[in-house]
Image (tube, helix red, strand yellow):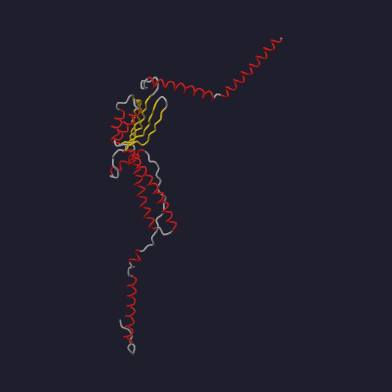
């Protein structure tokens, strides 16, 4: 293509003008295809996660607890060891109260246990001692056998075993879930930007942590009950007059005199409780007696 020529360097001027236009067009085209900076493309304002209330923990049905136990056991989170709480109740008679007390203390000590509570009382007919004993679960059966062996008369011996395995597994699984929820809320707390969000997350964390502490306390209590069995022991020495366990003649005679006097005092005290009826009786007696005397005087004067 030929361009018109000026008399004074016209061809060169047109050529430089077109070159300049082509260069400018190329630069604009190249700039329009440049990629955005990586930082600008990847930047997004951090969004605060939605705050939801902690999930409720209603009591699960028996089939769900069984499934929970199976899943937890198969996943290795829990041991399939059973949790059994054993208790026993023993009542028997002894010939020598002091010797029996010493004997029980020795058996409990050798079994590795301890006496949790003791209550001793008596009257003129018997002496009685009630004890709550804690012994290791492994020594429970042997301790019960030794306590009941060779007693004068066994009135009661009952053993109860309570299986709390399902409750223990369910409670432990709930606590594990709460711990995981706590971690999620901690992550949410790091992303919170306003005071309101922070306060809401902290309120949920407080509730969850209280549930975790309560579950830990309950688990520790159950572990304690499982590891240490309870024995409710009650033994007594009879001092009644007609019983073969009573002491000799003179002590029995003294008991008879004392019991007779106590019976008289008891009768008087009981009669004092009937004073309104006694007052009515005395009033009627005086009234009838006066009427009777008045009638006899009338008959005598007639």
Residue at coordinates 47% horizontally, 22% vertically from top-left? 261
How many labels, in total? 0
Quadrant placement of the N terminus: bottom left
Residue at coordinates 39% horizontally, 26% vertically from top-left? 126
Which x, y percent locates residue 206? 41, 50
Q: Is residue 219 left or right of residue 278?
A: left
Which x, y percent locates residue 299? 69, 10
Q: Give the image quarter of residue 67.
A: top left
Which x, y percent locates residue 131? 36, 33
In this rendered view, identify the residue nearer to me: 38 or 278. 278
In this rendered view, identify the residue nearer to me: 162 or 191. 162
Quadrant placement of the C terminus: top right
In this rendered view, identify the residue nearer to me: 154 or 33. 154
Which x, y percent locates residue 4? 33, 85
Q: Is residue 301 left or right of residue 100?
A: right
Q: Give the image quarter of residue 298.
A: top right
């Amino acid at each position: 293509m030929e361009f018109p020529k000026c008399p004074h360097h016209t061809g060169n001027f047109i050529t430089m003008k077109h070159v300049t236009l082509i260069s400018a067009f190329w630069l604009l085209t190249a700039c329009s295809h440049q990629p955005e900076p990586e930082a600008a493309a990847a930047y997004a304002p951090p969004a605060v996660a939605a705050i939801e209330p902690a999930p409720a923990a209603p009591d699960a049905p028996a089939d769900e607890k069984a499934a929970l136990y199976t899943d937890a056991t198969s996943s290795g989170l829990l041991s399939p060891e059973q949790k059994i709480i054993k208790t026993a109740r023993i009542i028997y008679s002894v010939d020598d109260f002091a010797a029996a007390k010493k004997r029980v203390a020795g058996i409990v000590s050798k079994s590795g246990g301890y006496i949790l509570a003791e209550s001793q009382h008596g009257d003129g007919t018997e002496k009685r001692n009630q004890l709550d004993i804690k012994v290791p679960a492994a020594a429970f059966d042997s301790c019960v056998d030794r306590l009941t062996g060779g007693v004068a008369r066994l009135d009661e011996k009952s053993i109860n075993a309570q299986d709390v395995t399902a409750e223990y597994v369910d409670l432990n699984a709930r606590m594990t879930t709460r711990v995981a929820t706590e971690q999620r809320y901690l992550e949410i707390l790091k992303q919170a930007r306003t005071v309101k969000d922070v306060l809401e997350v902290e309120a949920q964390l407080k509730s969850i942590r209280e549930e975790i502490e309560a579950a830990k306390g309950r688990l520790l209590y159950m572990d304690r009950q499982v590891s240490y069995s309870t024995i409710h022991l009650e033994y007594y020495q009879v001092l009644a007059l007609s019983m073969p366990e009573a002491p000799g003649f003179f002590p029995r005679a003294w008991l008879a005199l004392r019991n007779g006097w106590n019976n008289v005092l008891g009768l008087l005290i009981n009669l004092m409780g009937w004073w309104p009826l006694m007052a009515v009786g005395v009033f009627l007696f005086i009234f009838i007696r006066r009427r009777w005397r008045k009638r006899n005087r009338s008959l005598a004067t007639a």
